Image (cartoon, rainbow, N blue to C red):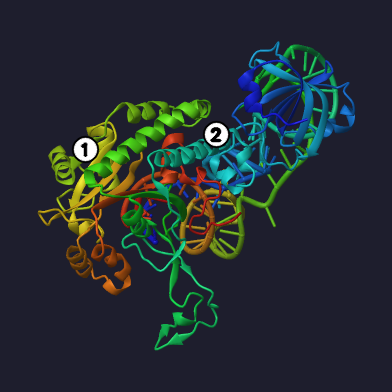
Amino acid sequence: MKRRKIKDILGQGKEQAEIVIMGWVRTRRDSKGGFSFLEISDGSCLKNLQVVADHNIDSFDSISEKLQTGSCVGITGKLVQSPGKGQSVELQAKSIEVYGEADPNQYPLQKKHHSFEFLREISHLRPRTNTFGAVMRVRNRLSYSIHKFFQDQGFVYLHTPIITTNDCEGAGEMFQVTTLKPDSIPVVDGKVDYTQDFFGEKTCLTVSGQLEGEVYALALSEIYTFGPTFRAENSNTSRHLSEFWMVEPEMAFYDLEDDMNLAEDFLHYLFKDVLEHCSEDLEFLNKQIDKTILERHRNITENEFERITYTDAINILEKLNKNFTYSVEWGCNLQSEHERYLSEEVFKKAVIIYDYPEEIKPFYMKVNGNGKTVRAMDVLLPKLGEIIGGSQREDDYGSLLKRMQSKKLNSEDYDWYLDLRRFGSAPHSGFGLGFERLVQFVTGMENIRDVIPFPRTPKHARF
RNA sequence: UCCGGUGUGGCGCAAUGGUAGCGCACUCGACUGUUAAUCGAGUUGUUACUGGUUCGAGUCCAGUCACCGGAGCCA
């Protein structure tokens, strides 16, 4: 007989003469009246299915001691209305098969609370907890709805390379990819001879698919990437990973305003979709992890984003006369404390800041007519800070070349990128969204290491 | 990388420089259509590591490592 998923069984709530379920025992409560209650989870939803196991069923005595928290079972039985509180239906077991035991003296997960620090040490077992199940189901839904949002509008999903020779300037330190042996690296004139390396030149893991995305946007009009990204920064914070997933749409014929509109529509869509399809998990997280997440989601979906220029943002911050750790003046980078103050205290909602000073932004952003600012924008969310960074790209060959020279970049390394401006250039824009930060904001999880299955951070790549 | 904090049974935590203890888990027993069940009893320790001060160190000092929080870098 075909296995039924607990999500479907509980969703229908109808009695059934005979069904089969498979899953892991979360807890067991014995009754000396001659039967046991087993809570079974198969990960299809947050809730467990209660199984009533009469001690008279075949071979119960031989499997009884194997039915412990963490063990894996297959159960055939009759689904009936439950006389007890807490569940509408329950399964009366006819037969139970134990697939895998879990010795209670050695199984590290207990019924009660575990700290996330401890669970991080057992990354291979933590998905069996309620919280990680909920977080990963939400992560999955967000991932699906990102694709749905773009696909429904005719964007092309583009696979950009993981291994690259491009340094997307300003994006951070890169991991080098090499097959050269550390103890015998070929050197010519005091420098490493990369012609002997696997690719014949220095290669790294990508820090952004943006430049490759531009190539295809200038042919297919609208594309997006959604894939892993790598940064070798020695960042030890609750918001940084060495390996994370990034969403990067890139659109021909979009100016900065179109770009901001897309970013706002995108976030509105994602939050509405996840509220609709993950309500059970989100209510659980709202109760257990962060009692403000549902309220924060409503704040995103029900309000238009505030849009102000960088210059106006600086004026607002200066007039506040607040004692920030970092002082505010035109030309400075907005610090975390400034961004959070604007979204949390001044506007109390999502804010888009645009038209940043040219000096503090990368070479590929389009310079405004005043020559002082570039068409860049950041979307800031209360509590989280920057979630999206984007810009209209410089589409004029001469301006781009000049900008590269003033930033002391070697234009020969970017000949292909410059070619895009020599042959059929077009106004175009794009943005990037750090996927784990989105999952963090949606689930209320404080540490980014707890919203990705296997976190990679400095000194940590186990599992 | 910088600043601050924390490392004590499997997990969460306590202990004025003076006998290392509690809760949970676990084991056994009692009881019950139970719901993180409840009640009783019991088992569990190189106090992160290395060195120092002291009659005596979980506690004080120095160093190392790990983890957490904040900052920078950034998404």
- Image disc number at residue A307: 1
Q: Position of residue B39 (x, y in %)?
A: 72, 19
Q: Can you name the residue that lies furthest to the bottom here?
A: A189
A353 over A289 or under it: above or below? below
Task: Say whether residue A451 is left or right of residue A341.
Answer: right
- The image quadrant that residue A100 belongs to is top right
Which residue is painted at 24% across and 61% down in the image? A363
- Identified by mark 1, the residue type is Arg
The one of A2 and A222 positioned closer to us in this rendering: A222
Of labels 1 and 2, the one closer to you: 1
Mark 1 Cα-neighbour bin, 10 Å: few <14, some 14–19, many ≥20: some
* Image mark 2: chain: A
Looking at the rendered image, the quarter that the C terminus of chain A falls into is: bottom right
Number of callouts:
2
- Can the viewer see residue A341? no
Task: Say whether residue A266 is left or right of residue A324.
Answer: right
- The image quadrant that residue A96 belongs to is top right
- Cα separation, mark 1 vs mark 2, equals 33 Å
- Identified by mark 2, the residue type is Ala
* Image mark 1: chain: A
Mark 2 Cα-neighbour bin, 10 Å: few <14, some 14–19, many ≥20: many
Element under disc 2: helix
Which residue is painted at 48% across and 41% down in the image? A143
- Image disc number at residue A134: 2
Which residue is painted at 18% across and 57% down in the image? A358
Q: Can you name the residue that lies furthest to the left here?
A: A370
